[in-house]
Image: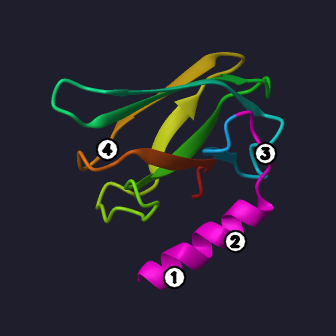
Amino acid sequence: MKKLFCILLLIVGVSLCGCADKRVFLNDNVDGDLDVSEVKMQRNHAGFLEVHIRGDNDAGKYFKSEYRIVWFDESGFPLDSLLSTWTPFPVFDDAEFYITAVAPHPRAVDFKIIIRKQEN
């Protein structure tokens, strides 16, 4: 399962466009429609890493998107988590969108997020 996920992440990573923050990957099907303008991280009061992402919908239309976050420990290894699933979120016409996520373990020190249009 881990091998399959790593291969999938590599394939998706190769086909994705760049972003100002190298931890954020916009899939080809949202490239040009979404723009990520801000990525912030902080530790919450319980010691867990929190990520806050702000972006804009430049598509001129409403559509459904989804994201998946992979959390990494200090050695750069992915942390196993049931929370690393595709999570849907709406992207409203010409509006900002926000994604907030909390790491599943206090050992998390970094992350990668993939954003794409929701598959039916």
Q: Which residue is mark 3?
A: 18
The residue beneath circle 1 is 4
| CA distance separating discs 3 and 4 | 23 Å
**Separation (CA) of disc 3 from disc 1:** 23 Å
Looking at the image, which is closer to me, 60 or 87? Answer: 87
For marks 1 and 4, give the CA distance. Answer: 22 Å
Amino acid type at circle 3 is Gly
Mark 4 and mark 2: span between their CA atoms? Answer: 24 Å
User: First in sequence: mark 4 or mark 2?
Assistant: 2
Type of amino acid under label 2: Ile
Residue with the most extreme left position:
46
List the residue tagged with mark 2.
11
Q: How many angstroms separate mark 2 from mark 1 (CA)?
A: 11 Å
Magenta residue span? 1-20
Image check: 109 left or right of 9?
left
Image position, residue 98 (x, y; %):
51, 24
User: Is residue 13 a member of the stretch shown in magenta?
Assistant: yes
User: Foreground: 91 or 84?
Assistant: 84
Q: Distance of mark 2 from mark 3, alpha carbons?
A: 14 Å
Name the amino acid, label 4. Ala
In the rendered image, residue 58, in percent from the top left (x then y), is placed at 78, 24
Foreground pick, 64 / 39: 39
* Residue holding disc 4: 103
Q: Looking at the rendering, in which quadrant would you find the C terminus?
A: bottom right
Label the magenta part by its dominant secondary structure.
Answer: helix
Badge 2 local density, few (<14 within 10 Å), some, or many (20+)?
Answer: few
